[in-house]
Image (cartoon, rainbow, N blue to C red):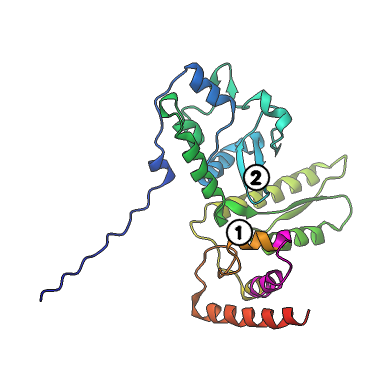
Amino acid sequence: MMSVSVMKRKKKHRSLRDKYPPSEPCSCEICRSYCVRPGWWTVEEASKAIKAGYGHRMMLEIAPEMTFGVLSPAFKGCEGFYALQEYSKNGCNFYTDGLCELFGTGLSPLECRYCHHLRKGLGQKCHEDIEKDWRTPVGQTFTAIVTQGVPAGGKICKYLEDSGENLGFNVTKGCCVWTLNPMTEGQKKDLQKKVKKCSERYYKSLMRSTPPVPSVFRLMLFRMGRRGVQNVDKKYYDYEYYKNKGWFESDYYYETSLGPFKKLLGRLFDFMGKQVSKRM
């Protein structure tokens, strides 16, 4: 009998850029109506827009369930702030007199480039895939910039960074700056220098292709902490949140390669967490 082996071809990964190619330029009423509501960048595109100096013209859109956020072109009047419904009627701050300032610059959001009146109903799928891009650890990078008038900002910055790590964010080192008014020229230069370095660290983290491997300490906090959450009343939001995120079964907050040693430690921390939760 002759045996036949069949090799499965590895499915080729398609980038969002390839999956959602640009549409033909159009100025019809339907396409112009799409331009009023700011489209979404991918994480990589938003990073490039920040590097190009457009960070101050963005807004942070936060999901209703508070599980992720997206940097997008801001509504007019909402630049540099959270997306607020009261400003939505003003439209995108890059859209003026029927034209987009970002058109042809290579910095237009993927969603804006893709949507077209001939692609009716397809924009939602593009929107959902960009959402998935922002839900990745690379899209959930965290930093802290603390302004202070008394010398206590360093501890606040450290607290915020720890909180970010405890919530599963990819945290980059933040900074603490003095903002007393009036400021001397030296203080202004120091502020600009610190914020510039902080933004460079943040940008470098955003551009990482893979999330960082957690330290033993962070792994311990996650694995032992989740056992405590697993034993609380199922009606609590913490339990429901962990369950929906798959954190009761996962190695860590996000997909990462732990290696044999940390996998073994993870199982040990699970056991320790279970024992501790029994005594609570």
Q: Tag 1 or tag 2, which sits nearer the N-term?
A: 2
Query: Which quarter of the picture shows residue 35?
Result: top right
In the rendered view, tell whether residue 126 sits above or below residue 212. Answer: above
- Residue at 64%, 49% (x, y): give it: 199
Q: Position of residue 55 (x, y in %)?
A: 63, 39
The residue stretch that appears in magenta:
220-238
Q: Position of residue 136 (x, y in %)?
A: 55, 54
In the rendered view, tell whether residue 266 sits above or below residue 187. Answer: below
**Which residue type carries mark 2?**
Ala
Q: CA distance from mark 2 to mark 1?
A: 15 Å
Foreground pick, 186 / 117: 117
Confirm or deny contact between disc 2 and disc 1 (CB under 8 A): no
**Which residue type carries mark 1?**
Asn
Label 1 sits on residue? 244
Query: Which quarter of the picture shows residue 218?
Result: bottom right
Label 2 sits on residue? 63
Q: Is residue 234 magenta?
A: yes
Q: Quadrant of the N terminus?
A: bottom left
- Residue at 57%, 42% (x, y): give it: 51
Question: Disc 2 on helix, strand or loop?
Answer: loop
Is residue 204 visible in this depiction of the protein?
no
The crowding category of the residue bearing disc 1, from other C-alpha atoms within 10 Å (few below 14, some 14 to 19, many at least 20), is few
